[in-house]
Amino acid sequence: MTALTDSPAWKALAAHHAAIKDVHLRTLFAQDPGRAERFSAEGAGLFLDYSKNRITDETLKLLLQLADERGVAQRRDAMFAGEKINTTERRAVLHVALRAPRGTRIEVDGADVMPEVHKVLDAMADFSARVRSGAFTGHTGKRIRNVVNIGIGGSYLGPEMAYRALRPYSDREMTFRFVANVDGADFSEATHDLAADETLFIISSKTFTTLETMTNAATARAWAVEKLGSDAAIAKHFAAVSTNIPAVTKFGIDPANTFGFWDWVGGRYSMDSAIGLSTMIALGPDNFRALLAGFHAMDEHFRTAPPARNLPLLLGLLTVWYNNFFGAQTIGVMPYSAHLARFPAYLQQLQMESNGKHVDLDGHVVNYQTGPIIWGEPGTDGQHSFYQLIHQGTKLIPVDMIGFCKPLSPIAHQHDLLMANLFAQAEALAFGKTAEELKAEGSPDFQTPYRVTQGNRPTNMILADRLDPATLGSLVSLYEHSVFTQGAIWAIDSFDQWGVELGKVLASRIIPELAPGPEPALRHDASTNALIARYRRMRG
Ligand code: G6Q
């Protein structure tokens, strides 16, 4: 394949960018009142208005041509067919199988994976139902009222995000906590008010070797045994989710409480696998299946919708447009929903671990920018903090805004205020306020330069009916496939994460050097040596 920057569409986009980079959204809207209708698309319960982007019909045509030239559709079909598109790990990438309905056939190495997927889902449903009904009891015969998920990264961010997002659908009689950090404070804070005889720990770890999770799992075991007075309590207070069943068995967790998944599920793509066990216990099996159905609806949309109306494809291509042609380094994601407080953090891993790569699939260092930095906070909170920089700073920050037409909260009258702010921010970012407008409004002259808001700041507006399980599934899948689209354009492996390995290796070298006793000979750089020595001194 031609190098990305030499491809005809890329070159045409570069020339096109030079021609339209200074054109204001005010001009684009004035010249083309039909653009709001034309630059919007709908699918799997989500509506996307992308008209407030710095694009024309020509931009869209060239971006779609780029997707075509780079074989995005072929790579997508290879993923859905179970081909080993994660080439650096020689693995299939099949999170789409986790939410495919019964009866679908998806093969990896000639074997249909779907019967196993549904077997695990059924086992999770049975276990969840027993925990929720009180049929599953703890060591002293009491029902389980607290669930603590112990896991980190992909084995944490999804479950926590989903629980917070869908709390109104959860069993309010139960408490759900999430422990990720190896900082003992995380475990202490999560458990300080919990009764051990009513608490279930779910150890969520694909590998069952991760330092943080194994350390917290050992702490949880000691906590439970100490409070319940017997090793036998482990069988009644621990469940596990892993691909490494021998390690789970060695830890002492009852095989009946153990749920598997497969190497073709990447950690950051695993919230809809058994890693979602805490989600299923919180919401109940039916709501979890609705979540999966939402994921699947967007998968089908991505697989079958025509390119010009394909939401994940469009979102991915717009990211490439700003990242590579406008030089935007970051993208803000602002959900106008307090329930989606952890959604930006979830997307941060999804996007940055997937597309933070500097080598292409052929092993060559790339000569173009890859994955942007993702960050965000719920609106309206962010408006009273960092939005100033987006409105009037010197950096271009494209923003995705997410809103829901119906509230989840019973305090429904506040919802119009929330939505008014959502629409107002997108309007202000796009159109700003000119000196003339300020003057006409009577703004004092001396303030005018400071009050001018340039506008021309792009946004995508994603609207849905209501934040329910299916909508959350669809929303996550939208971003998964947007990330996929970007990775396919940049010809990188979006499914490995070699960059996180080095730090892990170095930490394991330093751990024994911090052990109590005489200071060992340190052979790091001068800075690291001095920091270790200072820590040992100050720790006492
Ligand atoms: C995700 C990453 C990473 C992983 C954690 C936890 O794609 O691989 O975030 O999920 O390191 O790993 P385990 O589930 O194996 O404990």
Image (spheres, helix red, strand yellow):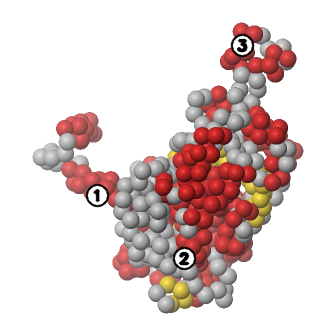
Q: Quickly name the residue at label 3.
A: 447
Point out the image quarter for the C terminus. Answer: top left
Q: Residue at x 69, y 65 (%)?
A: 307
CB under 8 Å between discs 1 and 2:
no
- Would the CB of label 2 be found within 8 Å of ligand 1? no
CB under 8 Å between discs 3 and 2:
no
Position in image of residue 105 (x %, y %): 61, 87
Which mark identifies residue 151? Answer: none
Relative side of 440 to 523, left or right: right
Above or below — where is 203 with respect to 256? above
> Where on the picture, by quarter, is residue 41?
bottom right
> Where on the picture, by quarter, is residue 29?
top right
Q: Residue at x 42, y 50 (%)?
A: 367
Q: Residue at x 39, y 58 (%)?
A: 359
Position in image of residue 249 (x %, y %): 39, 80
Q: Quickly name the residue at label 1.
A: 505
Going by the numbered disc 2, the residue's amino acid type is: Ala
Q: Secondary structure at mark 3?
A: helix
Of marks 3 and 2, the one in the foreground: 2
For the question of whether residue 227 can be seen, the reply is no
Going by the numbered disc 3, the residue's amino acid type is: Gln
Asked whether 98 or 245 is in front, the reply is 98
Of marks 1 and 2, the one in the foreground: 2
- Would the CB of label 3 be found within 8 Å of ligand 1? no
Q: Residue at x 56, y 46 (%)?
A: 14
For the question of whether residue 285 can be seen, the reply is yes
Going by the numbered disc 1, the residue's amino acid type is: Val
Relative side of 300 to 536, left or right: right
Which mark identifies residue 78? Answer: 2
